[in-house]
Amino acid sequence: MGLARTLIVVGLILVAAGVLLMFGARLPGHLGRLPGDIVIRRKNSVFYFPLVTCLLISVVLSFLAWLFGRR
């Protein structure tokens, strides 16, 4: 029963990630372009480091791990 539940949760997470990737560009302030993300544009190159996006994803994943790890 535990493996089945884990597979269902992983599947739902993958579906949610797919939906976010499909429709994320249309949302205002979508992931990857949040205030606080570092973008340095030069003449021939662009350096991009999504600092705030990484922190937000880390907090959400930590919360989900805590939520599903409780017994």
Image (cartoon, rainbow, N blue to C red):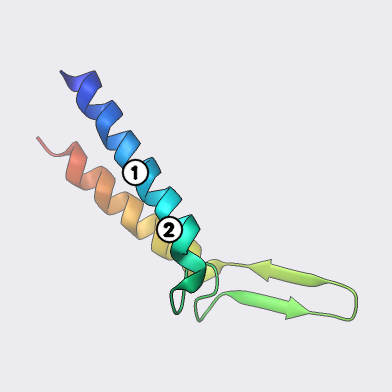
Considering depth in this image, is 19 or 59 the residue closer to the camera?
19
Quadrant occupied by the C terminus: top left
SS class, disc 2? helix
Q: Is residue 38 left or right of residue 68?
A: right
Percent position of residue 62, x then y? 31, 51
Percent position of residue 53, x then y? 48, 66
Is residue 15 placed above or below 54 in the rendered structure?
Answer: above
Q: Residue at x 44, y 79 (%)?
A: 28
Q: Quadrant of residue 9?
A: top left
Circle 1: residue type: Ile
- Tell me how many marks there are: 2
Q: According to the image, label 1 marks what residue?
A: 13
Circle 2: residue type: Leu
Q: Earlier in the sequence, mark 2 or mark 1?
A: 1
SS class, disc 1? helix
Q: Residues within 10 Å of mark 2 (few under 14, many from 20)?
A: some
Q: Residue at x 56, y 74 (%)?
A: 37
Q: Which mark is residue 20?
A: 2
Which residue appears farthest toward the left when viewing the image?
71
